Amino acid sequence: MFNVDHLDTIIVSCNRYREISRFFSELERPVRLNAPLKQKPHNQNEAQTALYELHRQFLRCYGLSRGPENVKGRFDEKVALVTGAARSLGRSLAVAFAKEGADLIVNDICAELATVKYPLGTEERLAEVAEEVRHLGRRCMAVKADVSKAVEVKSMVRRAVRDLGKIDILINNAGISTMVDVVNMPDDVWDETIAVNLRSAFLCSKHVARQMIRRKYGRIVNVCSVYGLVGAPCAAHYSASKHGMIGFTRSLAQELAPYDITVNALCPALTDTEMSRAVANIYTTRGWDQIASEVGANTLFPDHRVMTVQDVTEAVLWLCSDSAKYITGVALPVDGGFLTN
């Protein structure tokens, strides 16, 4: 008897797709393919995405469950684009949206930047995130692109809409952080920080919002920082990019509200991510452990800890859910009361 779990281990080539499609069509209760799947995939990535869509349709047709898949998720039938998705928070967001029913476009630059001293996301790690999403029964596109460059953003959005039909949710999560005082800051450090942290949010929002407007629905969340609400020494470039993102959020929210599109900014305090640890260990003499202890001591709750990626992820999911459909233009701190102390 055919075991649906075998689908998770099949390595699909473009030549085998027709054979697999025929199997599905000859079942006792044939699985009818959606229009985008009737044509043979052009490459391995399209073939994998098509296979997982067949898998999902098979489960739906036969009423089978893999864990909680028959439980309605908050984002069933939605498509989410997460930038900076190869590591830490981005990965957590992508997997969380998939668990709640969304299909995904996961993006990362998959390259090193001259002004950044720590490793960034890689193609291998981005592929791992995509595979994790697909293993949950969701469609997923992994797109290597520099979201600070207009031509690459435009291409990514066009491909996503072509292959997945739409983008309902945009999470502008791509970002970098370094530390240097203003008088010693090289111009390219300032320029690259503004480009990656702020220009990318503008470009992705611009191109994604156009198709959201046509469908009169959308959720945009810009991942900012408490340093978009206050300043910090040796972080003027980072703080300026996050202050700019909050201003951008408030303005864009006013422009898109008539189309039932919400736009919000999330402002975490220090969060335990690969980037935060690297910045603390490379650019300071105190190191991550001491800085995390000091920041945690200034939160209000008894455990006195820094934020986790799960803390931030849950807040993002809430802002994108129907529970927050009347919340727009806000800069929401996720900081354990850090700013009030």
Image (cartoon, helix red, strand yellow):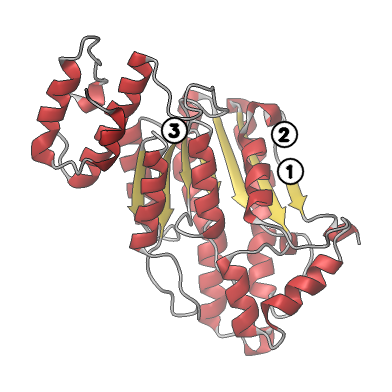
- Image x and y of residue 39, in percent: 15, 28
| Furthest residue in direction right, as rendered | 341
Q: Residue at x 51, y 64 (%)?
A: 196
Question: Is residue 160 at least partly visible in the picture?
Answer: yes
- Image x and y of residue 293, in percent: 78, 72
Discs 3, 1 touching: Cβ within 8 Å: no
Amino acid under disc 1 = Val
* Sooner in the amino-acid sequence: mark 3 or mark 1: 3
Quarter of the image for residue 324 reads top right
> In the visual, does 325 lie left or right of 137?
right
Q: Residue at x 38, y 48 (%)?
A: 130
Q: CA distance from mark 3 to mark 1?
A: 23 Å
Q: Which mark is residue 318?
A: none
> In the visual, does 5 lie left or right of 209?
left
The 10 Å Cα crowd at callout 2, few under 14, some 14 to 19, many 20 or more, is: some
The 10 Å Cα crowd at callout 1, few under 14, some 14 to 19, many 20 or more, is: some
**Helix, strand or loop under label 1:** loop
**Helix, strand or loop under label 2:** loop
Of residues 308 and 211, which is closer to you in this image? 308
Amino acid under disc 3 = Gln
Residue designated by label 2: 327
Judge depth for marks 3 and 2 and give the one in front. Answer: 2
